[in-house]
Image: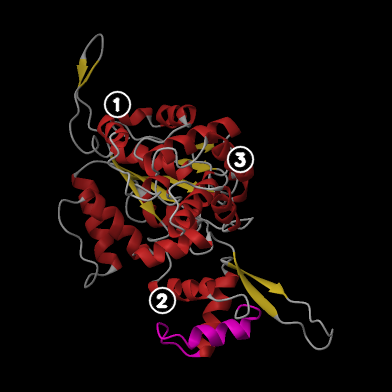
Amino acid sequence: MNIDDRIERRLGYDASAGVVVDPDAVSPVTHPPSPTGRGPDLERLLDVLDPAFAGALPPSIYVHGPKGSGKSAIISALFGRLSTYGGRRQSIQTSTRAVDPTLPEFVHVDTRRAATRFRLYHDTLAAVSDERVPDHGIGTADLAAELEATVRTGTDVVVALDHANEPETPDVPTLVEWLSDVTDRLVPVCLGREPPDSIDWRPEVTIGFDRYRHHVLVEVLTTRTSAGLVRNALTHEQIRDVSEWAAGDAHDALAAITGAAWHAERAGATTIRPADLDAGIAGVPKPCVSLGRVLALSDSRQRLLYELVSLSEADRESVNAATEAIASTGDVDLSASTVRRVLYELADAGLLDRVTVERSDGKGRPPSRLVPRFPTLVFKELFERR
């Protein structure tokens, strides 16, 4: 937050803003331009990327760590800043001489939205080309040729491939192969949760992220909430409680706080009360799937999930009951059989749990119900607001 924002808050300019002033500042799927609490990890990345500042190719890198440990936040912020330097002559003065290296281009690609060879080439080319890259009417081979020509006549490109190895995204070896098929001047920086020994790729450097320590996560949450919520909406003690509950996972902590804030707003409150915080935490299942995976789904699949989490408990008591209720809504133009099939596919992808319901009479095959594994309060609010 800048100084003007802080002064305006003191003047009361946000008095009628409810609880949430800036949804992006507290969203679990939005990363700030200057992340908090990961200084040493940022320095490690800069050390590995150091050859680029002398105009040379940096090594291939695999960044790994659990969900909510700040991998995407740091890489997206760092590559966003480096992209303003890449691809042009940047004069760097030293104590003995002035050098004029050509820095590589730095590109951050979210493989949740670039899960095919076509989309990977398209998004990478769009980031390094001065020309508009069409979404349709062009083949994958044409994109590859254009990307190769752009790199060959320009500079090397360091490509961060975020969220690799998820159920809906390609694995690391596939992504690396797709890049190497174009040119060896595309250097991969892959981000995933699996340890290096479990992936079939041997990068030149590996960097591991641990979960946030309690006091560091408190600092992260304090910074994000001071930017995104009205002043005094959340007490320091509440932030500490959320941090302890989240056990080092910034995604889950932010999802709980955001859900609590919107729960308070809907009740007409101006601060997050204990009941709001309880509701926000209850809306984040454990273990929790990243909300980014849900928001990367097609609109039709997001609609089905929205209808599912909006059902009453009675309508969600079994898969059949949920299917019939969803298929009967006016906003879903699908047959019951198609709704059931898609819901099962989402369960297979890990976004829903199939939980067996015990029959009271003990007769027959027990039915199953679908339980969301993602932050439901935040998802519902984001879906409705869009």
Residue at point 47% right, 71% down? Answer: 306
User: Where 138 sits versus 92, above or below?
Assistant: below
> Where does the N terminus fall, quadrant-wise?
top left
Residue 119, horizontal then vertical, whole percent: 33, 63
Most foreground residue, 62 or 343? 343
- Answer few, some or many: residues within 10 Å of disc 3's Cα (few below 14, many 20 plus, some between 14 and 19): some
Work out whether mark 3 precedes mark 1 in sequence or the reverse, and give the earlier one.
Answer: 1
Question: Residue 241's mark?
Answer: 3
Marks 2 and 3, Cα distance to the nearest angstrom?
Answer: 36 Å
Residue type of the residue flagged with mark 1: Ala
Marks 3 and 1, Cα distance to the nearest angstrom?
Answer: 46 Å
- Answer few, some or many: residues within 10 Å of disc 2's Cα (few below 14, many 20 plus, some between 14 and 19): some
Residue of label 2: 300
Residue of label 1: 54
Q: Nearer the viewer, mark 2 or mark 1?
A: 2
Q: Nearer the viewer, mark 3 or mark 1?
A: 3
Residue at point 53% right, 85% down? Answer: 325
Q: Is residue 49 left or right of residue 308?
A: left
Marks 2 and 1, Cα distance to the nearest angstrom?
Answer: 48 Å
Most foreground residue, 162 or 24? 24
Work out whether mark 2 precedes mark 1 in sequence or the reverse, and give the earlier one.
Answer: 1
Which corner quadrant of the image does residue 299 belong to? bottom left
Most foreground residue, 78 or 9? 9
Q: Secondary structure at mark 3?
A: helix
| Residue numbers of the magenta segment | 316-335
Residue type of the residue flagged with mark 2: Ser
Residue type of the residue flagged with mark 3: Asp
Residue 139, horizontal then vertical, whole percent: 26, 70
Q: Secondary structure at mark 1?
A: helix
Residue 59, horizontal then vertical, whole percent: 42, 36
User: Where 199 sits versus 206, above or below?
Assistant: below
Residue at the limit of the structure toward the top, as seen here: 96
